[in-house]
Structure formats: structure tokens, C-alpha cells
Amino acid sequence: IAGSSCRASHLAMLRQRFASSSRRSFARCIASESHAVKMNMFQAVNSAMSVAMEENPKTVVFGEDVAFGGVFRCTLDLREKFGPSRCFNTPLSEQGIAGFAIGMAAVGHNCVAEIQFADYIFPAFDQIVNEAAKYRYRAGGQLDCGGLTFRSPCSAVGHGALYHSQSVESYFANCPGLKIVMPRGALQAKGLLLSAIRDPNPVLFFEPKVLYRSSTDQVPSGDFSLPLGQAEVMRQGSDVTLLGWGSQMARLMAAAKRAEAEDGVSCEVIDLQTILPWDRQTVMDSVTKTGRLVIAHEATKTGGFGGEIAAEIQEQCFTSLEAPVQRVCGFDAPFPLAWEEFFVPNEHRLVDAIRKVINF
């Protein structure tokens, strides 16, 4: 897209998109009036890292296989653009990647470290929760490793089975000092990733890999950011609030449309976007209005972050609730291969939950 009229049209589209959330400032969302280009999500992630590396010569990208573009092509051409000292491969050691990233960030570099699959982030768990998250606190604010972002593909992909399908955000949500982000599509991936890279705190940026090629949008080609810690109201409604993040948002939107068409139920749909810190106020305002809440995530129900949200809403919005909070989640079992579509929350399970809270 080129020319002032096209740019104005694109900005008008973005204004309309973000108007649903009154707490979101348009000025903060649009960092520059750059041309918009159709991108899928892996291209948007690549674009965000390219902008960050052009902006700051101390920004580096590294991880397993990233030098040739990575298994999902998110780092394609970054080595050619910025050189082998700023985009490079690491050994197959997630603990080593995390420790190296913390050290580089502690001495002033802006590190974007890729963990090739979120399922394999657990060897790095100690480094992330005991070192990165606590670095500033233990130094009394005199030292930090805030210029640190861990990118990692996550969640179901259609054929990943038990070792390439997990959603691990709740494992880290119990750790003060971290931020956790999960985008629902290409536009959000670029805007949120740039904010994550610039944030003065360690950020875990989980990318639903099923969206890398399936999610496309008109994305600003230059600098573009979205604020962390703010949910987005994607659809206004009056009868029930539907809340999720990542790849669940498309399914929640489909369930909302079906509930309205078949049952006349008006669903408000909210994308949490940032799991830690999560936007309590936007969710509470919606639940106070609708009186009902359905939460969806792919992670298992027991210990999933939906339980934290349900507890907080029950505590803060008890007198507004017309029905118990419902959670539609992955089952408490290892992630299956042949039965993946039955394991993850789908449109049918979501519509059943909507009907349950409406008919309570």
C-alpha cells in the first residue's frame, strides 16, 4: 500500500479496530504512519525484530537455527541484514541460551532469545524464574537484565502431539518480575513484540505456531507498537463475556457469532493479550455489565491461568455474577496426536459453555 490516501485509509481502519477499548490510546498504538503491507504472522514477527535491530545496534537475536531463518522462518534474512555478530546460532541448550541472554542483557545488550519450541523451555526454567525475574530485585534496583525477550512458538499446530503442542504460560505466571504476552495474529504480533523488546523487564513472548501462516493482516511496515498489559475488546456484547488469548480468539469469535445466530445471545469477546500483568479492569468492567464469564485456553484446566482469572473475578465481581464462571480448557492429560481437535477448546465446547451460563 502506497500513497497518502492509502495511508489515511489504513490509519482509519486501525482507529476503528482499537475504538472498542476506551482505555487504549490511539497515539500509543501507532508509533509511525508507515505504509501497511499484507503480512502473515511469521513475517510480522520478523518485521518487528528487524525494526528493533535497526533502532538499536545493541539488539541481538540468537537461538537454535535462527541464522538460516529458523524452523518457522521468523528470523529470515536477519543475519544477512545485520551480520553474524547480531543474528547467530546457539548450541542445542535451552539453559545455555537463557543464561547467555541474561548475561548479555545485564551488561547492556537488548537480547531476543528464541526457544525453538515452548515445550523445551523447561531446561531454562531455573535461569528464567530464579535469575532473570529476580535480577533487579536482588540488586536493589541497581542492576537489571530488563532488555531481554524470550520468543517461543507454542500451542497446538494440528500434528505436534505431546512434545510440540503445549501451552506453558501458566508455569511462569506465578513468578513476579516477568511479563508474559501471547498475540492472536499478525498485527498484534508485531505491535506487542516491539513493545516487549523495548520493555525494561524480562518478557516471555509466546507465539501460537498455528498462526504463523494462517493469520494475515495489513501490518505497518515500519515502527508500530501496542501497549503491554492491556486487553482488547474485540466484540461488544451484553449477555456474556468470552475471554481468551492467542489462537483461541478465532474460536471464541466463531462461538460468539454462532450463539447470537442460534440463541440470540449477545457475547462480548476480549483478547487478554498480556497474561502477566493481566488487565483486570477491562475484564471486571465487562463482567459487571454482562454478569457472566467464559474463559478459554489450550493449557490444561488444572493449574491453567483461567483459574487465577476465575478466582479474581469471583472475588471482585461476586454481586454482579449471574452464573458461575466457566472454563473451557485442555483436558488434564498429555497432549494427544490423533485427538487434538477434541482436546483443545473448540467452537462446540465453547457454545455449550455459553448456553450453560445463560441457562443457569
Image (tube, rainbow, N blue to C red):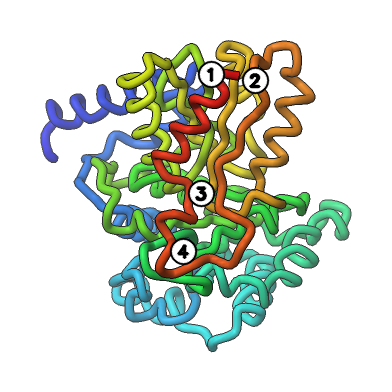
**Which residue has dot 3 on it?**
182
Q: Is residue 67 visible?
A: yes
x, y percentage for residue 96?
64, 82
Amino acid identity at mark 2:
Ala
> In terms of secondary structure, where does tag 4 sit?
strand
Gap in angstroms between the C-alphas marked 2 and 1: 8 Å
> In terms of secondary structure, where does tag 2 sit?
loop
**Which residue has dot 4 on it?**
153
Amino acid identity at mark 3:
Met
Amino acid identity at mark 1:
Ile
Gap in angstroms between the C-alphas marked 4 and 3: 10 Å
Q: Is residue 270 left or right of residue 38?
A: right
Q: Earlier in the sequence, mark 4 or mark 2?
A: 4
> In terms of secondary structure, where does tag 1 sit?
helix
Q: Residue at x 69, y 58 (%)?
A: 171
Gap in angstroms between the C-alphas marked 3 and 1: 29 Å
- Which dot marks residue 15? none
In this rendering, the answer to whether 85 lies above or below 357 is: below
x, y percentage for residue 114?
50, 70
Nearer the viewer's eye, disc 3 or disc 2?
2
**Which residue has dot 2 on it?**
323
Mark 2 and mark 1 residues within 8 Å of each other at the beta carbon = yes
Q: Earlier in the sequence, mark 4 or mark 3?
A: 4
x, y percentage for residue 287?
61, 19
